[in-house]
Image (cartoon, grey):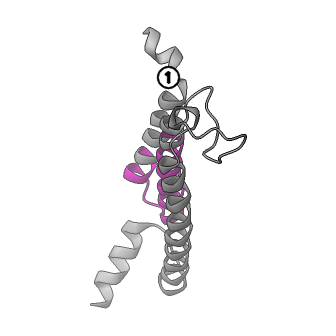
Amino acid sequence: MGPNLLTNYYEAAAMIVFGIGFTTLLLHRNLLKKVIGFNLMDTGMYLFLAAKGFIAGRKTPIVVDGVTSAEAYINPIPTGLVLTGIVVSVSVTAFLLALSIRLYARYHSLDLDEILRLAGREA
């Protein structure tokens, strides 16, 4: 284990969570498990962005006590990207779950192979 892994444990955790989500999205055939994998990938990405935006010893970019030096504050862009991404992720998750409900109501299954088989029979 290298010395950088111990100092960058947030980034390492983000990559592990992203990898678990990607593997879940890739290997499972159940639609709900795919939605969970997608959310894990999002979470890993947000953790990575938040870890990259944090600088120890600096404050949030709100000017107090007359300190206007840029070196005293963290960069607010990664935080804004994370917040925007969370809003988009919630919207996409709601759409995916609504689509899963509609597919289940029509085909009485959440397995992609079963849905494709039944959809091919209808055509």
Q: Is residue 16 above or below residue 36?
A: above
Is residue 1 visible in the rendered image? The answer is no
* Quadrant (top left, top right, bottom left, bottom right) of the C terminus: bottom left
Which residue in the rendered view is the most extreme toward the right? 65
Image coordinates for residue 80, horizontal then vertical, percent: 52, 55
Q: Nearer the viewer, residue 121 or 34?
A: 34
Q: Position of residue 24 (x, y in %)?
A: 45, 48
Q: What residue sits 53% from the left and 35% below the top?
A: 51
What is the secondary structure assignment of the residue under circle 1? loop
Residue type, numbered disc 1: Asn
Q: Crowding near pointer 1: few (<14 within 10 Å), some, many (20+)?
A: few
Number of numbered discs: 1
Furthest residue toward bottom: 123
The x, y position of residue 46, in whole percent, is 51, 47
Q: Main secondary structure of the magenta part?
A: helix
Residue 101 included in the magenta stretch of the image: no
State which region is magenta.
23-48
Front-most of residues 57 and 108: 57
Q: Residue 65, percent across and down?
A: 72, 40
**50 or 104, which is in the foreground?**
50
Residue at 63 percent of width and 43 percent of height: 60
Where does the N terminus fall, quadrant-wise? top left
Q: Which residue in the protein does label 1 denote?
A: 8
Tell me if I can see residue 53 in this picture: yes
Q: With 111 as the anchor, is 60 left or right in this view?
A: right
- Please say whether residue 45 is one of the residues in the magenta stretch: yes
80 relative to 47, above or below? below
